[in-house]
Image (cartoon, rainbow, N blue to C red):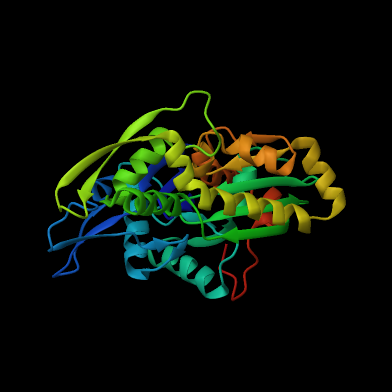
Amino acid sequence: MGVDLGTANTLVHVRGRGIVISEPSVVAKDARTGAILAIGAEAKRMVGRTPASIIAVRPLKDGVISDFDITEQMLRYFIHKVHNGIALLPRPRIIIGIPSGVTEVEKRAVQDAAMSAGARWARLVEEPMAAAIGAGLPVNEPSGSMIVDIGGGTTEVAVTSLGGIVVSRSIRIGGDEMDENIVSYARREFNLLMGERTAEDIKIAIGSAYPLDEEVTTFFRGRDLLTGLPRSIEVTSAQIREALDPSVEQIVDAIKDTIEETPPELVADVMDQGIYLAGGGALLRGLDTRVAEATQMAVHVADDPLTCVVRGCGKILEELENYERSLVVETYAALPH
């Protein structure tokens, strides 16, 4: 199994079957007993709508495990779900994508969670590496490829060559931060309190990083902070772009900083083939144009950017000997193959 353990969504790829699970990384549990009530899509529907006795938890923050036990239960649930009705080995080999900026302790936590959840063998791969493989970039060639993976909690920028990452940068800015930008904009400009789910819907509906050919409008719905009553305000895509700008600007800066650190030969390669955007954030309208303008390079959005990392994990599993160099080096006792 290849697993993209994301802040916003967890995707699972099974060898020979493709992507079998794509669900939000959310777990709903009973506040009194701690029992798990729902995982994935069902739990996501409960966010912001639960009574006091139920809490909806996102066990990963900024791509890193913040609640070990719940992450382990979530992984176990996904492993069981994959095996339902299929005569597969009950203890799968798992490759998991992790952000490139994580510490040794955080790497160990992900590996331990996978082993506790029933994996026979667990190895890690840095998400930008997996995204580059999933996007079909020639990572094993002696030429530079640049990938920008914009997820829910982190944005990873990396230049790969000869099966490894030459330069990388990981910033804790992603889709979640953009939702927060919209929430704070609504509060600052209109004294309106809105939930993150609503903000996310607005971002998907009319969010952009570059002026659109035709600006569109939608409604902010929330509670007026002055009167305490519900209120609805019409906003334009230009206003949402202004709200998202702080996060977009940081992502563009991270890309420019990474280019500055890249060896000149590899920069020449990247200029030839362009920069590739992956992850859910790559779907933000006009982001490719904005990055292209800032870097003076061609920018491409990978095919199906949301699944690049998990497709990369799946490809590594299928051709392990070709991609052994791309996996994170084991820093403690190697697990048996």
**Quadrant occupied by the C terminus:** bottom right
156 vs 41, nearest the viewer:
156
Res. 169 visible in picture: yes
Res. 19 visible in picture: no
Q: Position of residue 227 (x, y in %)?
A: 15, 52
Name which quarter of the figure residue 270 lies in. Answer: top right
Q: Position of residue 328 (x, y in %)?
A: 63, 63
User: Total label count?
Assistant: 0
Q: Is residue 171 above or below residue 186?
A: below
Name which quarter of the figure residue 71 lies in. Answer: bottom left
124 vs 208, nearest the viewer:
208
In the drawing, does residue 166 fall left or right of residue 116? Answer: right
266 vs 184, nearest the viewer:
184
Q: Position of residue 146 (x, y in %)?
A: 70, 46
Residue, far top: 214
Q: Residue at x 60, y 35 (%)?
A: 302
Name which quarter of the figure residue 66 lies in. Answer: bottom left
209 vs 260, nearest the viewer:
209
Q: Residue at x 39, y 43 (%)?
A: 22
Q: Residue at x 83, y 55 (%)?
A: 263
Q: Position of residue 56 (x, y in %)?
A: 25, 58
Residue, far right: 265
Q: Residue at x 37, y 57 (%)?
A: 75
In the drawing, does residue 253 fall left or right of residue 58? Answer: right
